[in-house]
Amino acid sequence: MADHRIGMIVPSSNLTMETELPRMMRSREEVLPEDRFVFHSSRMRMQKVTPEQLKGMNAQTERATLELADARPDVVATACLVAIMAQGPGHHCVAEDEITSVLRGQDAEVPVVSSAGALLSGIEALGARRVAVVTPYMKPLTETVVDYIQDAGTEVVDSLSLEVPDNLAVARLDPGDLREHWRRLDLARADAVVLSACVQMPSLSAVQHVEDASGLPVLSAATATAHRILSDLGLKTMVPGAGALLGGGY
C-alpha cells in the first residue's frame, strides 16, 4: 500500500478544490485500495475574481510554493484556472515552470500540474476538437477562458456565463443546478462538455449525470486536474462516477 502526498496551491477563498479532489481520491481508494492519498495546501490571497486580484494572487506563487515544498509532496497542483488564463495564451506553461524551478531549488523534483494546463490536456486526452463550456465568471472573463482554449487548438462552440463575481459565492453555487444549466448550451457540434471551467464552482456530483443525459463526455477543471495528478504519479486514471476522462481508459 502506497501513500501519495498531493500538494495544492489554492486561492485563499477557494473552498471547492480541497473538497472535490479528496472526494475523488477517497472514491478511488474504495475500488483501488492499494493507493492512498494525503493532501497539503498552501494559500494565496484572493477574494474577488477580478484581473487586479488575479494578478496580485499570481505574485504570491513563490512564497506559496516554498511553504508547500517543506511538506515534501509527491506532486504539486496549482488550482486557479482563470488566474493563469487571464495572463494570456499558454501561460500555464510559464506558471508550471515557475513552480517547478522553486521546488527544484528546495531539492523537490516532483511533477507540477496547473488546473489550466490540466483542462487542456484532459480535452486532448478525450480527443475532443470542439467543446461547450460552463463558467461562473462574468462574460469578459469567460471570453478570456474561451480564447485560451481556442488558442490551444480546441474550438469552443458555445459557452455559458453564470456571472458570479464573488469567489465565495461561486463556492456556494448548487452543483445540482448544473444538471439543468447544460441544457442551455448548443451541443450540436460539441465533442465534449466542460461543465465547470473553474476549480471553485462545485460540479463533481453533476458530472456523471450530465454525461449520461447528454451522451457526450463531460469533464471539469477539477476532474481534469485529478486525471493529470494520477497520470503524473504513474497511477491508473480511474475514479468511479466522475465521467469518461476518469474511467481508466485515458
Image (tube, rainbow, N blue to C red):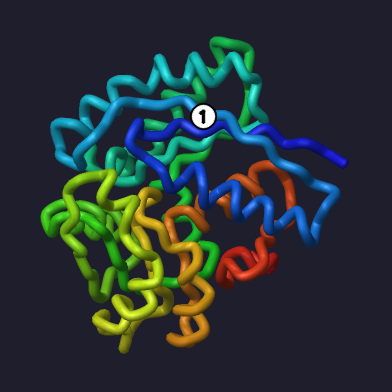
212 relative to 82 in the view: left or right: right
**Is residue 157 positioned above or below 105 on the image?**
below
186 relative to 92 in the view: left or right: left
Percent across and percent down for residue 165 are 17, 49
Amino acid type of the residue tagged 1 in the rendering: Ser
Q: In the image, what residue occupies the spot 67% across and 67% down?
A: 240
Q: In the image, what residue occupies the spot 47% across and 20% down?
A: 65
Q: In the image, what residue occupies the spot 68% across and 52% down?
A: 26
Percent across and percent down for residue 197 are 34, 57
Percent across and percent down for residue 211 are 49, 79
Percent across and percent down for residue 104 are 57, 16
Q: Which residue is mark 1?
A: 41
Mark 1 is surrounded, within 10 Å at the Cα level, by few (under 14), some (14 to 19) or many (20 or more) other residues, namely some
Q: In the image, what residue occupies the spot 19% across and 55% down?
A: 164
97 relative to 231 in the view: left or right: left
**Is residue 95 positioned above or below 242 on the image?**
above
